Image (cartoon, grey):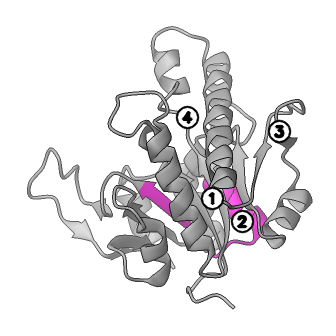
Amino acid sequence: MSSAPYRRVIVKLSGEALAGAEPHGIDLDTIDRFAADLIAAQALGVTLGVVVGGGNLLRGATAAAHGADRTIADVMGMLATVMNALALESAIERLGGRARTVSAIAMPQVCETYERRAARRHLDDGRIVLFAAGTGNPFFTTDTTAVLRAAEMGAQAVLKATNVDGVYSADPKRDPAAVRYDRLGLDEAIEKRLGVMDLTAFSLARDHRIPIIVFSIREPGAIESVLRGAGRATIVGG
């Protein structure tokens, strides 16, 4: 039995977080810390899927803004998420956990191709499933992917790990008067265009009644704390 309020969740982990203190790249010590956090969270009796971004290596929208074809740029960004997922899978396995990377873009020599029923079986069997390559389509963010996979996997929540401890009315780094929300409706988040997730992700979460819990990943054990209801976070929807 789970000692957390959710039996199954999808964790959305930004690619930038994987760089640690560096501006880009993969910091292996940071990867190990996240892997340990995921294993500890799973020990609560929660089945975990992870959607990881690729912004630490390449962001499709940024490449497109510099003149690259948007479709090709987005595919490059999706490939970056595969690299991140494989690094995280390796760390989880090295620390004694069980993990499986599944990619929305077929690359059978590297990892499994995403298939909904097979991914659910991996979760049921106790593996941490790392969903790579976004939706497999250009023009969709990994935020939208996280909500989509949550709906497909029957998850009760999306945990969005960021560099701030919740959702604010404005960027707290730029506006000292920014107000932090403890709880927020999905309709309100959409109406106010709060930048923590894109509108497609918010709309999909609203349609499927999936709450999004926004929290800071900076502290060790943050995922486990949020699942216990003890961590500082903003609950959007639910």
Q: Amino acid at mark 2?
A: Ala
**Residue position for label 2:** 151
- Which of the marked residues, 1 or 3, is nearer the chain's N terminus? 3
Q: Amino acid at mark 3?
A: Cys
**Residue position for label 4:** 54
Q: Secondary structure at mark 2?
A: helix
Q: Position of residue 29 (x, y in %)?
A: 45, 43
Would you say the residues marked 1 and 2 are in contact, meaning their CB atoms lie under 8 Å apart?
yes
Residue at 65% over, 77% down:
46
* Residue in the foreground of this view, choosing between 153 and 4: 4
State which quadrant residue 217 falls in: bottom left
State which quadrant residue 141 falls in: top right
Mark 3–mark 4 Cα distance, whole angstroms, equals: 17 Å
Residue at 46% over, 16% down:
65
**Callout 1 environment at 10 Å: few (<14), some (14 to 19), or many (20+)?**
many
Query: Does residue 106 show up?
Result: yes
Residue at 47% over, 31% down:
56
Which residues fall within the magenta stretch? 146-161
**Residue position for label 3:** 111
Would you say the residues marked 4 and 2 are in contact, meaning their CB atoms lie under 8 Å apart?
no
Mark 1–mark 3 Cα distance, whole angstroms, equals: 22 Å
**Residue position for label 1:** 147
Mark 3–mark 2 Cα distance, whole angstroms, equals: 23 Å
**Viewer-side label of 4, 1:** 4
| Residue 144 among those drawn in magenta | no
**Viewer-side label of 3, 2:** 3
Mark 4–mark 2 Cα distance, whole angstroms, equals: 22 Å
Q: Position of residue 163 (x, y in %)?
A: 33, 51
- Which of the marked residues, 4 or 2, is nearer the chain's N terminus? 4
